[in-house]
Amino acid sequence: MVASKNPSSPQVVESPSTPDGLDTLNIAALIYRLEAGMPLLVDANETAKTRLQIGDRLPITDPWQWLDAQFCPVPRHDHPALMASASNASQQWQCFHIRQPLQPLQSLQLKVSALETADGADDTIHVLVAIGEITAVDDTPSLLSQTQPHLRQMLGNLAMGVCIIDAEGYLRLVNPAFCEFFGYAESELLNAHFRKLLPARHQPEAEKHHASGFPEALNQRRAVEVRLQDGSTRSVIIEDTVSHDEEGQPQRIAFLVDITERLDVERRLQEKNRRLEYLATRDHLTGLHNRRFGLEMLGQSLERSRRCGDKISVVMLDLDHFKAINDRYGHAVGDTILKEFSHFVAGVLRTSDTLIRWGGEEFLMILPGIDRFAAQTTVNRVLLQLVDRPLSAAGLRVSFSAGVGEHRQQTLEALLEEIDQALYQAKSAGRGCVAIVPVPTSRPEAQDDPTLSTL
């Protein structure tokens, strides 16, 4: 129940209820409850429900956007309902605007006053917003301010997207290309915050960048991911500069160039180059380094050993009776055995070791940091574990013969020849064994056959 019809003076009510008496004066009345400084609309008279299309779904947060007299969005901390508690609150009618979805912009003349409960026991703060005049506003947006005709004409004719953003981050001007790119109508972009055009994950950083670089920063250029009206994302280059409007207020003019297709082409090219590099250095069947690249790696490893004085051993191994497997079970089974064998051996070796497919059923191991005897122990361990490991769907068990050599400052070609001779000795000894290249001495009797080790 209303004690006074003067909406500018404090009202005393038995409880925070709608001042229906203002309906006779055609004054829309809204009651807000302030919770932690935030306004919540808890009631409205029939005039407000009808003219502002609120309905009976109360309490609610504002179903519209508040704009000030200059059509600028009102921050939450400047909500009209909070004016009643301001020390400099004016008792005059003030102009605001509200924007509702699918409704024309409306201009409001309003006064705000605090409401008091009859017994004064309730500490909850309620505020009455009396709206004396509501008029529709033609808000058909102009792409650019009429006070900047030359700028409007220049930006409006550009094929690239252009926008002007104020210090608070709100879009003040947009050109047709900008609207077309993002898929929004002009009315949906003007006075909206620029974060509307960004994926949520990029919004905090973008707002921080805008605040820290405004208005001093000039001629910035950066790549940004943006979000279109349909929810899809694109990559753009933004090049912007800071200028001032006719009132001297700073504004950021941003030019957008879509680089999504270019980035896609670059990514595909990078993927193709990586694929070509992989094919050039890898064996297509096993995924191991191929012989050509393996020779480069071996040469680099020997040079590093020669320069630093580190030990390095090299092993050549050959699967036993592999031709018989291909002849009996077919090449598909043979290929599967080569792949599974490669995966197994690579998994047994150290991360510093390298396994190379030398060709056919031959493989080369580069074992840095160990001499030929330690390398023989390593290869024997692999050979022993392989005995109990069936390969392929046929469950075949295979073995290999191996020749082990150690770098002693000889050439790469000489080392490979020594290892190949040791491998031949291992095969001649019955296969399934490892032969070590002997170290030549000045004594003739030292030129014996390679040392053999078998399972």
Image (cartoon, rainbow, N blue to C red):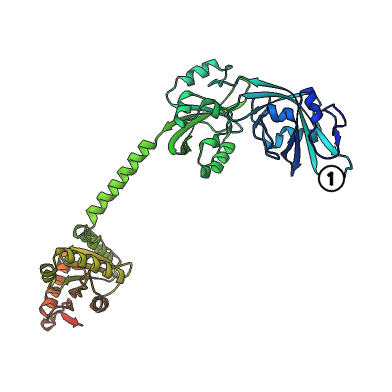
The N terminus lies in which quarter of the figure? top right
Residue 82 visible in the picture: yes
Q: Residue at x 45, y 27 (%)?
A: 180
Quadrant assignment, res 408 = bottom left
Q: Residue at x 85, y 29 (%)?
A: 9
The number of callouts visible is 1
- Give coordinates of residue 358: x percent, y percent: 18, 64
> Circle 1: is it few (<14), some (14-19), or many (20+) Cα within 10 Å?
few
- Give coordinates of residue 36: x percent, y percent: 74, 44
Which amino acid does the dot numbered 1 rest on?
Asp
State left or right for residue 135 relative to residue 158. right
State left or right for residue 221 relative to residue 423. right
Residues 85 and 12: in front is 12
Residues 90 and 269: in front is 90
Residues 219 and 304: in front is 219
Quadrant assignment, res 424 = bottom left
**Does 307 sit above or below residue 404?**
above
Tag 1 secondary structure = loop
Residue 411 visible in the picture: no
The C terminus lies in which quarter of the figure? bottom left
- Give coordinates of residue 376: x percent, y percent: 23, 77
- Give coordinates of residue 420: x percent, y percent: 14, 70
Q: Which residue is mark 1?
A: 122
Residues 139 and 310: in front is 139
Q: Residue at x 24, y 60 (%)?
A: 289
Q: Residue furthest right?
A: 119
